[in-house]
Amino acid sequence: EELVLEECGLGPKGFETLLVALGEQQPRLVALNVSLNRFGDQGMKAFRRLKGDALKGLEDLRLVGCEIGDAGALILVEALFAGLLPAVAEVGSHQGCVDLSR
């Protein structure tokens, strides 16, 4: 399944709420597109609250234009190394692409 919430006004608190809900419900999510939302580094902190394999099936994570800086990118890398986003581990490949462009 794919969840597209592109350019819908999702702020830091909204992104955190979304990730917590996805972690609790553990849907069969393959793609998550939250591009063009301005949650920035503050919203990326929500990845630190994920537990275990909450997003284990995720293959495509789109974060284009989300105002993510160095701190947010570091949080994403930490989540990758912690195994919270195992299917997205190959950053930049066609399959499992993580786009952090501003």
Image (cartoon, rainbow, N blue to C red):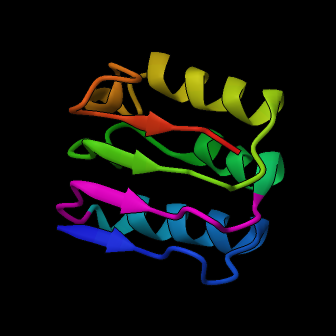
Q: List x then y, in percent, for residue 95.
A: 21, 32
- Residue 35, magenta (yes or no): yes
Q: List x then y, in percent, for residue 56.
A: 26, 41
Q: List x then y, in percent, for residue 9.
A: 70, 82
Quadrant of residue 73 within the rendered picture: top right
Quarter occupied by the N terminus: bottom left
Compared to 4, does 46 lie above or below?
Answer: above
Compared to 41, does 6 lie above or below?
Answer: below
Residue at horizontal 78 percent and vertical 52 percent from the top: 40
Per the rendered image, the range of residues in magenta is: 27-39
Q: Which residue lies furthest to the bottom in this view?
A: 8
All told, the count of numbered labels is: 0
Q: Is residue 89 left or right of residue 81?
A: left
Quarter occupied by the C terminus: top right
Q: Which of 77 and 38 is in front in this view?
A: 38
Q: Is residue 39 left or right of residue 22?
A: right
Q: Is residue 61 left or right of residue 74?
A: left
Residue at horizontal 17 percent and vertical 61 percent from the top: 28
Compared to 97, does 68 lie above or below?
Answer: below
Q: Which of 89 and 7 is in front in this view?
A: 7
Q: In this view, does 88 lie to the left or right of 14?
A: left
Quadrant of residue 98 within the rendered picture: top left
- Magenta stretch: helix, strand or loop mostly: loop
Q: List x then y, in percent, for residue 13.
A: 75, 70
Q: Which of 49 and 92 is in front in this view?
A: 92
Compared to 28, does 102 lie above or below?
Answer: above
Residue at horizontal 27 percent and vertical 46 percent from the top: 58
